[in-house]
Image: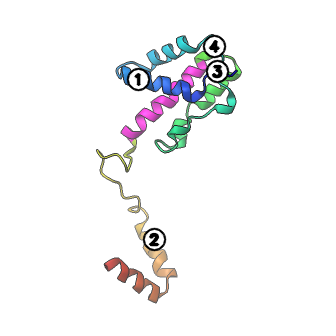
Amino acid sequence: MADAPTVSDIFRYALELRSQNSSASYKDVKSQIISKYSGGPLPETAYLTIPEYDNIAPEEDWTAGLPIVLRGIHNNDWNDVAHGIIISLEQVENYPKMSGREDDPAKEWRNREKGIASAEEKNLTKWMPEELMAMAQKSLAK
């Protein structure tokens, strides 16, 4: 099975297809994946990951299709493998558009502390001695 593609190889191929033709539908990309890889060896389950996306999108997004890829490998079904790849591809492509990522220059940074500021203030005043609180406020003022 040395010539078997990895899930990452197939995912990169799907990304390449989308970059070559961004108007191609996910159905078209899926068809191209199936036509390229079907008949060949399936990916090994030991390499059921897309590690290069760990820092791009949350794990629950880039791994969304991996259970279906795994099912396809177990059932020897390239249609399921391609379908799982497309699910992950769609999640990864849509994440930056839908998430309001902090590192997205087109979006204004979201203040995650906004919802917890009052609880944090309550806890700090309740548990932090006055001297430490004064030091903390003094250092914030600088």
* Looking at the image, residue 105 lies above or below residue 33: below
* Looking at the image, residue 43 lies above or below residue 36: below
Residue at mark 4 to residue at mark 1: CA–CA distance: 22 Å
Labels 1 & 2 near each other (Cβ < 8 A): no
Residue 61, x across and y down, in percent: 51, 38
Kind of residue sitting beneath label 1: Arg
Labels 2 & 3 near each other (Cβ < 8 A): no
The answer to if 29 sits in the magenta stretch is no
Looking at the image, tell me whether mark 4 or mark 2 is earlier in sequence order.
4
Disc 1 versus disc 3: nearer the observer: 3
The residue identified by callout 2 is 120
Residue at mark 4 to residue at mark 3: CA–CA distance: 7 Å
Q: Quadrant of the N terminus?
A: top right
Labels 4 & 3 near each other (Cβ < 8 A): yes
Kind of residue sitting beneath label 4: Gly
The residue identified by callout 4 is 40
Main SS, magenta region, reads helix
Considering every residue shown, the one lying at the far bottom of the view is: 131
Q: Give the residues drawn in magenta, as a range.
A: 80-98
Kind of residue sitting beneath label 3: Ala
Dot 1 alpha-carbon crowd within 10 angstroms: few under 14, some 14 to 19, many 20 or more: some
Residue 31, x across and y down, in percent: 50, 13
Q: Secondary structure at mark 3?
A: loop
> 121 or 29: nearer the eye?
29
